[in-house]
Image (tube, rainbow, N blue to C red):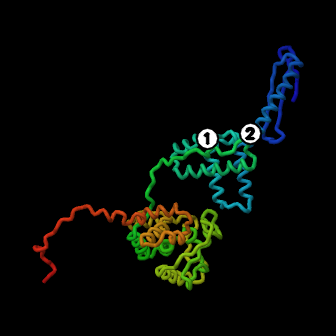
Amino acid sequence: MAVTSYKENGSDYWAVYVNIRSSKNRTIRKQKRIHGLESEKKAIQLEKSLIKSLTEEINALENLGATWIKVVDQWEIRIRNDPFQKYAKTTINDYLATIRTWTKKWNERYASTLNSGDGRALINFLREEGKSYNYIRRLKNTINLIYRWGIEERLILGVSKPPLEGVKLEKFEPEKVPEILTREQIKKLLYEAKRKEHPWYSVWAFAVLTGMRNGELHALKWTKVDFDLGILRIDCTYNSRSRSVKQTTKAGYWRTVPISKDLKELLVELKSQTGDKEFVLPRFWQWDRGSQAGVLRSFCKEIGIPSVRFHTLRACFATQLLASGVPIHKVMAICGWRETKTMDVYVRLTGVNVAGATDSLDVIPKAEIPTQNVVNLFRT
């Protein structure tokens, strides 16, 4: 703070400069400078007035808490250094990249001033950008997650809920039928792959025969194959982004997969090929880098069947079991699903939930065929 005098056009004038910074949050600062005062007394009075008003503004800003970008930055520091946090490094990276991309306009705003209107505006903008319902839902959940953490840590003051909590997100796009292959298409895929000695044959066959996730297949070791009990023990997964094996599955718990007759034959064949190698399935650079879907899609096009993702092979496994009459709870246990939400899609694909429901609709009149004039063409 200062009161200074200066000359202008031969006359004496005074100027006032006031600069106040918060003692609680050093990023909060207010300053003001005024020129052209005709007396020192007026300058001193104005200085006192400015000190009071700017101090009140500082106090008000202190009660608003941190800016949105400050909350996000602090959440990142906490989550990356928490040894007990449940998120994978890649998941944290995805969360932060999404947040920082779509909430840039919020960065310098105090988080406590964000409201439902800001939330709805963000959702509408994402829709205009062509983002899917699931993408927007994930972003909404991530914002709410970080905002609630900010409230709990007292970085966000004066509010009790996130700006997107309570904002309805209506499903504005029609549900699409998932990619799937019929039984005959599955047979053709594996037949042609084996006939042409495609290097990925064993990987695709293993996926169809076990329903294992891509990362689980990549990480499967011979130590997890129990021929005596006739099971595979699934307890780890490979992450192509970090190029590392995580000692747990995506769902967070281990499970067993029964070894069928066909799978046993495939395992015996693989064992003869791999010898003393650690992993059951062969290694490919495309697989290491997470590009396995492109290889499968190209081969599907080559042999004239629908081009599908690698993950679709897991769906094929589930739908074929359901269509064969295997109980839903067993399919869920083998595939590692605890919730029925994903399972419901495959149940609808196979139609097992409505099978036989229309058999009683015997309403079409049947024409009576006279038998006396019928000639048996196969009688000699």
For numbered disc 1, what is the local secondary structure? helix
> Is 184 displayed left or right of 68 in the figure?
left
Q: Mark 2 — residue?
A: 64
Query: Which residue appears at 55% of the width and 84% of the height?
Result: 227
Q: Mark 1 — residue?
A: 116
Q: Label 2, label 1: how many angstroms apart (C-alpha)? A: 17 Å
Q: Nearer the viewer, residue 128 or 278?
A: 128
First of labels 2, 1 by sequence position: 2
Mark 2 surroundings within 10 Å by alpha-carbon count, few (fewer than 14), some (14 through 19), many (20 or more): some
Q: Nearer the viewer, residue 352 or 311?
A: 352
> Is 219 displayed left or right of 160 in the figure?
left
Which residue, as the protein is rendered here, is positioned at the far top? 10
Q: Which mark is on residue 329?
A: none
Tell me, yes or no, if residue 297 can be seen here: no
Query: Which residue appears at 52% of the width and 43% of the height?
Result: 128
In the rendered structure, which amino acid carries the disc numbered 1?
A: Ser
Query: Which residue appears at 84% of the width and 22% of the height?
Result: 46
- Residue 56 sits in quarter: top right
The relative height of residue 24 versus residue 284 in the rendered view (above or below) is: above
